[in-house]
Image: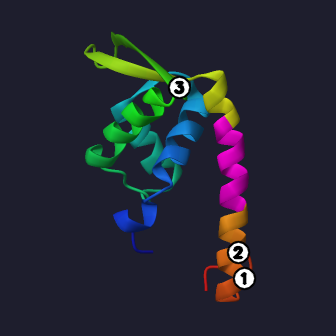
Amino acid sequence: MPRIMARHLYGTVDLLILKIISSHGPLHGLAILDEIRQRSDDYLQVEDAALYPALHRLQKEGLLTSEWRISEKRRRAKFYDLTPAGRKELTRAVEAWKHHAGAVCKVLEIAWGDES
């Protein structure tokens, strides 16, 4: 199966970040990238150039907080965590994504989850 192209990820990176952090608690950027890659069986590969602006934007919007900590590799890293507003936005964004994906599947005349 080919990897998804970056242009197809546009608009979903925020959702992926919020979901990964909600599942794991505070994480640094590289851990977020690794988790997205692992959960998607290497299909989704978000680049640093997309991740860090998204993290900063989400923080500016009040959806994430951050603090400096020592990573598992004993390096100083900024760890991001969800705010209550971030949890609320995640719920809203997941529902919006379900509706969007379902509508696209209808237009393509495929069942949800069908790989045709």
On screen, residue 59 above or below 18: above
Direction from residue 93 to residue 2 in the image, left or right: left
Secondary structure beneath label 2: helix
Residue furthest out toward the front? 61
Amino acid at dot 1? Lys
Residue 47 drawn above or below residue 67: below
Q: Is residue 66 above or below residue 41?
A: above
Labels in figure, total? 3
Q: Secondary structure at mark 3?
A: loop
On the image, the x and y values in percent for residue 60 come to 44, 28
Residue 44's image quarter?
A: bottom left
Can you tell which of label 3 and label 2 is closer to the viewer? 3
Q: Which residue is mark 3?
A: 62
- Tell which of 90 and 23 is nearer to you: 90
The residue identified by callout 2 is 103
Q: Are marks 1 and 2 in contact (CB under 8 Å)?
A: yes
> What residue span does the magenta drawing correspond to?
89-98
Q: CA distance from mark 1 to mark 2?
A: 5 Å
Mark 3 nearby-residue class (10 Å; few <14, some 14–19, many ≥20): some
Image coordinates for residue 48, horizontal then vertical, percent: 28, 43
Residue 34 in the image, given as x and y percentages of width and height:
40, 41
Residue under the image location 66 percent in, 66 percent down = 100
Disc 1 or 3, which lies upstream in sequence?
3
The secondary element bearing badge 1 is classed as: helix
| 97 inside magenta stretch | yes
Mark 1 to mark 3 CA distance (whole Å)? 35 Å
Q: Main secondary structure of the magenta part?
A: helix
Whichever of callouts 3 and 2 sits on the residue coming sooner in the sequence is 3
